Structures are given as C-alpha cells and as structure tokens.
Image: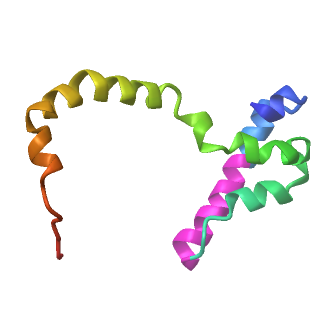
Amino acid sequence: MAIVKKGGDRQVCHEKIRVLSHEAGAVVKQQGGENDLIDRVRADKFFEPIWNDLDELLNPSTFVGRAPQQTTKFLEKWVKPAIEPYKSQVQNAGNAELSV
C-alpha cells in the first residue's frame, strides 16, 4: 500500500512481491539459505519510492494492533485475581530447574 500511495500500481506491486517472495522462498527451501525477501525489495528499482520507508514499514509494532493493551487488560481482569490467593506461595518459592 505504501507503493500505491506513492503512485505505484497495486497489481504490478502485488506481482513484483509475488515473484520476489517465490525467489526468496526458493533460496530458503532449496538452498537452505536465509530469507532475503527484504534485500530483494531493496534491490528492485520498482520499490525505490519506499526504500527509505522500509524500516518503518517493517517495524513489528505496526502489526500488533491493540494486542498489548488487550493483554494488559486480560492480565489485570483475569490473571491477577486468579493468582492472588497463591501470591505468598509464589513469593516464597525457591528456584526450580528443568532439564530436558
């Protein structure tokens, strides 16, 4: 959508991303390499209008929506009251080790 906002064609962009993602997928699946899709986008002149915006566009926090607030609300409303009766036991508990 960032490309479209800068004048790019949505269908052309979709096809470019599809082709680049298949190429990057082949590197991962057939060669055992790292996913280099973003590097491919950075190298493709079609995406030049958003090259400087890619870091911000790919920031994971832009994809979580209200999840942090919903999690906090859930913890406050349900988890904290559920563990309150066991608070002293948890605070006085020692360390535990898990060997797998």
Q: Position of residue 22 (x, y in %)?
A: 63, 58
Could you tell whether 100 is left or right of 58 in the image?
A: left
Could you tell whether 91 is left or right of 27 in the image?
A: left
Among the 4 quarters of the image, the one containing residue 25:
bottom right
**In percent of the image, x 76 and y 61: which residue is there?**
39
Q: Position of residue 11 (x, y in %)?
A: 76, 33
Numbered-mark total: 0
Does the stretch in magenta take in 22?
yes
Quadrant occupied by the N terminus: top right
Range of magenta residues: 17-32
Above or below residue 7? Residue 46 is below
Above or below residue 28? Residue 72 is above
Magenta stretch prevailing secondary structure: helix
Among the 4 quarters of the image, the one containing residue 38:
bottom right
Quadrant occupied by the C terminus: bottom left
Above or below residue 54? Residue 84 is above
Q: Nearer the viewer, residue 28 or 91?
A: 91
Q: Position of residue 2 (x, y in %)?
A: 79, 33
**In percent of the image, x 62 and y 71: which residue is there?**
27
Q: Position of residue 81 (x, y in %)?
A: 17, 25
Above or below residue 25? Residue 32 is below
